[in-house]
Image (spheres, rainbow, N blue to C red):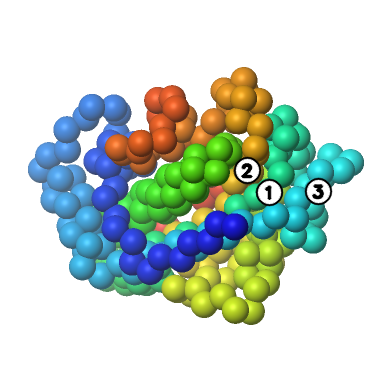
Amino acid sequence: MFELTENNPPVEVPESEYQRLLGYPKNHELDGRARELADAARTWFSANGRPWIHAREIGALELTGGKSRIGGHEFSSRRLYDSFAAAAAHSAVVVAVSAGKECEETARQLWLESKPDEYFFLEIFGSAVVEHLIAQASGRICGWADLQQMAVLPHFSPGYSGWDVAEQVKLWNLISQDNRLQFPGELAVLDTGMLRPKKSLLAVFGVTRDVEKARRFSKLIPCENCPLPGCQYRRTAYRRAPAQFEVIRRQG
């Protein structure tokens, strides 16, 4: 069984991913004030951020009636069910990652200090950190699965297209149901499905022993959505990040 908990994992957000989230076109070179703000956010996080990762395999997976039942918790997403069924998934790895509450608290303070530009660049960097953490988790899960001659499906999260964000509550209950677990940082889920701290993500990765079946469905290979640089388990080029529920905008 796979289990991973990391407190303060290394964070090396690729510049291209940070700029993409900032809204700049591909291959754009930051300069002037934008360069200063981007570097300041990265430097602040390197010194003060407290990111963390938790992942755990759950072997109890049932697929019936268009719904997925993982560890006794039923999820209604048809897209989740279809991807698991297409790949003959036999288990799932549930994951929680967070950039840490410090990032959100500092960004809020910057806003209160009437520093909207500094606020915005740190907010965006926090989102880039979350993407980087889920990519790190994906790489570790893929490495474990490869050694077991299994394949891992792309991560899927409540709030993505085809999965009601309200099921974040169910997913968090599943992730945190083991009383032995000591999470590296704070995380809470509101009734609406919103996460606190908001620079966090809950996700599910399907796992299958039918590697050939997963390969026949290119969309079931996670690499296209994974920007992790230098991954030895990469099977195809990174193309895009999945659309996420969180919409980042300036406060006002």
Place of residue 69 in the rendered image (x, y in percent of width and height, measured from the top left): 79, 52
Asked which quadrant contains residue 227, the reply is: top left
Q: Residue at x 72, y 35 (%)?
A: 88
Q: Could you tell me the amino acid type at mark 3? A: Glu
Q: CA distance from mark 1 to mark 2?
A: 5 Å
Going by the numbered disc 1, the residue's amino acid type is Ser
Across and down, in percent, residue 211 comes to: 60, 30
Residue 87 in the figure: left or right of residue 186: right
Res 181 label: none
Identify the residue under disc 3: 62
The answer to whether residue 105 is visible is: yes
Residue 54 placement (x, y as % from top left): 50, 63
Residue toward you, 233 or 203: 233
Q: CA distance from mark 2 to mark 3?
A: 13 Å
Amino acid type of the residue that numbered disc 2 sits on in the rendered structure: Val
- Name the residue located 70 percent from the left edge and 55 percent from the top edge: 59
